[in-house]
Amino acid sequence: MVQTPNSKPYDLEDRCLKFARRLNSYILKLPKTITNIEHGKQLVRSGSSVGANYIEANESLSKKDFILRVKISKKEAKESRYWLYLTEPLGSESSERDALVQETNELMKIFGAILGKTK
């Protein structure tokens, strides 16, 4: 766990888990159309993979493996954003989709910063 400047503990693994749970909740609320069902399946895979690969990065045995896993986490966050854009929420769920898209953008920036500092 990393300390932020304001001394609050910050755990990226936990943030990724919360992101995946928010995605699950969002997907369950989507109208059951063919496109939402298929895009939702992809979103579940990519969204949960963000955190799974970051956990793998933290358990890596080499710097090269760490970098690879963080790159995959970033890629999966970007893919999640794509699938979010393709979902068709009800009007009230559009704001949740926008918030999830924002979270994917932030996660991509975090992983990009980690990569920049690691190389």
Image: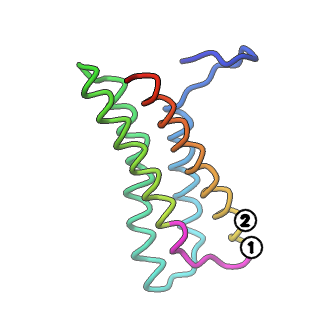
Residue 108 sits above or below residue 65 on the image: below
CB contact under 8 Å: marks 1 and 2:
yes
* Coloring scheme used: rainbow
Region rendered in magenta: 84-91
Residue 72 sits above or below residue 102 on the image: above
Tell me what residue is drawn at x 24 percent, y 19 percent.
62
| Percent x, y of residue 48 | 42, 49
Report if residue 11 lies within the magenta region: no
Residue that extends furthest to the bottom in the rendered view of this protein: 33
Q: Residues within 10 Å of mark 2 (few under 14, many from 20)?
A: few
Which residue is under mark 1? 92
Q: Nearer the viewer, residue 30 or 12?
A: 12
What amino acid does circle 2 point to?
A: Ser
**Dot label at residue 95:** 2
Tell me what residue is drawn at x 38 percent, y 47 percent.
49
Tell me what residue is drawn at x 37 percent, y 24 percent.
119
| Percent x, y of residue 28 | 54, 67
Q: Nearer the viewer, residue 115 or 86?
A: 115
| Percent x, y of residue 42 | 38, 65
When asked about the image quadrant of residue 60, the answer is top left
Residue 69 sits above or below residue 88 on the image: above
What amino acid does circle 1 point to?
A: Ser
Mark 1 element type: helix
**Dot label at residue 84:** none
Q: Nearer the viewer, residue 102 or 112?
A: 112
Q: Residues within 10 Å of mark 1 (few under 14, many from 20)?
A: few
Which quadrant holds the N terminus?
A: top right
Mark 2 element type: helix
